Image (cartoon, rainbow, N blue to C red):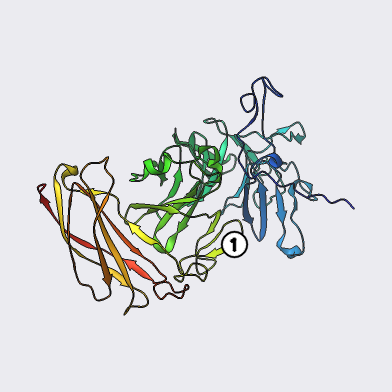
Amino acid sequence: MDGAYQINVGLDAYVPSAGWGSGTWGSSTFGSTSAISATGQLRLWTHDNFGEDLIINPRGGGIYRWKENDGTDARAVDLSGISGANLVPTLGLQVITSEVDRHLIVLGADPIVGSSRTGSIDPMLIAFSDQENALEFEPLITNTAGSLRLSSGSKIVGAVKSRQEIVIFSDTSVYSMQFVGPPFTFAVNLINEATGLIGPKAAVTGDAGIYFMSYGSFYIYNGSVQKLPCSVLDYVFSDFNVGQAFKIHAFTNSENNEVGWFYPSSSASEIDRYVIYNTQEQVWYYGNLERHAWLDSGVENFPQATNDNYVYQHEIGFNDDGSAMTNVFIESSDFDIGDGDQFSSISSIIPDIRFLQDTNSGSVNVVTKVRNYPGESLTTKATSEISSNTTKANIRARGRQAVVRVESNDDQSGSGNVSLGWRLGATRLDVKTDGRR
């Protein structure tokens, strides 16, 4: 007996194109370019609810519907093959539904020629169904189905729903799509050029607008597009695998007022890092973590995330999957007085550290490092042990630039499975201008 996939699996790495320039000079398809098929490309899925049904689409592939009434034993089926379907796109780059007016929207659909779909994606075409009917895509004067084509850019990269609009990103531009009713149904307005989306999952709706990652910068859209000042911009984009940018995915951690992006560093083909922006405090921080998908709290009590093998529950507990975490730290960026023109003397630290457990025996170390010139390595000048009873730590550190690091070895009991929970607040330092002695 032979078996076959209903949908063949995709690649585990992104391939931008095939043909001329993508292989050895003079070999095979030299002199031509061709689109990569859905089965010969990195597999990215999008899905959205249409009422109680689920519409799903592998990027560059077909469009499928799972019908809630059919129960969990039933599979999703090709939307264009359902009885009553009329000129439903056979391919698409992303599916999304408009909330209030209930249209199914296919980004990067195959166009209609004559009385059928072509079966070839138009990467800038938007097709939308009749209102309340995901099976009717033929534009008629008696319905609201139709299509629009974007002009700025070469392909639609992704889209995100926001309040009363859908924000669509091409590789070079940002558009706003809004329901306006018959006879046009939808209006699409060009919001900004030269700020395209770096990957299909690199935009997310946050507390103040839509946050997205472009080529070399981070932005927010809240009626207009604005660049986010970013103190870690060089760290992210100077060590970043641009060839696998389609693996980036943005996320929100609403409980902590955070938006962030998981991305692959330059030496990695898979996600291994994150960068986070705190929207209330307007500060950035980064770290190393492998997460391929993320669900914010809401449906579940805590955020859920995955890597290749596991589903993790975040923001709960202090252990690393049952084991104590080691080498836990938070480290500041360099700080100075007068843009580093003067030497600083740090004489004491007033810690603001809350111990969440082991309040009688737990402790952390506050490490103070300095350097005199930007090109020098940091030198540790003081390591202060801080417990719940510590009110102040006296130190002596002098330099043009300083860094403070709070760290702990969480297996303080020696049992191998006890983690120390602590939170860092507004730690204060006594810093004065000083001469070099």
Q: Left or right of 43: which side holds 86?
A: right
Q: Between residue 209 and residue 241, name the one nearer to us.
A: 241
Asked if residue 240 is positioned above or below residue 370 in the image, the reply reads: above
Please state the horizontal and vertical placement of residue 421, each as a whole percent of the image: 38, 71
Which residue position holds label 1?
310
Please state the horizontal and vertical placement of residue 408, each as a whole percent of the image: 36, 66
Q: How many marks?
A: 1
Q: Which residue is at 54% across, 66% downward?
A: 299
Q: Which residue is at 44% across, 32% downward?
A: 194
Please state the horizontal and vertical placement of residue 419, each as a whole percent of the image: 42, 72
Asked if residue 88 is positioned above or below residue 296 in the image, the reply reads: above
What kind of element bears circle 1? loop
Q: Between residue 169 and residue 404, name the one nearer to us.
A: 404
Q: Which residue is at 20% across, 48% downward?
A: 336
Q: Amino acid at mark 1?
A: Tyr
Please state the horizontal and vertical placement of residue 225, each as a whole percent of the image: 40, 41
Q: Between residue 227 and residue 366, name the one nearer to us.
A: 366
User: For residue 143, which quarter of the picture?
Assistant: top right
| The residue positioned farthest toward the right in the image shown | 1
Asked if residue 62 is positioned above or below residue 69 in the image, the reply reads: above
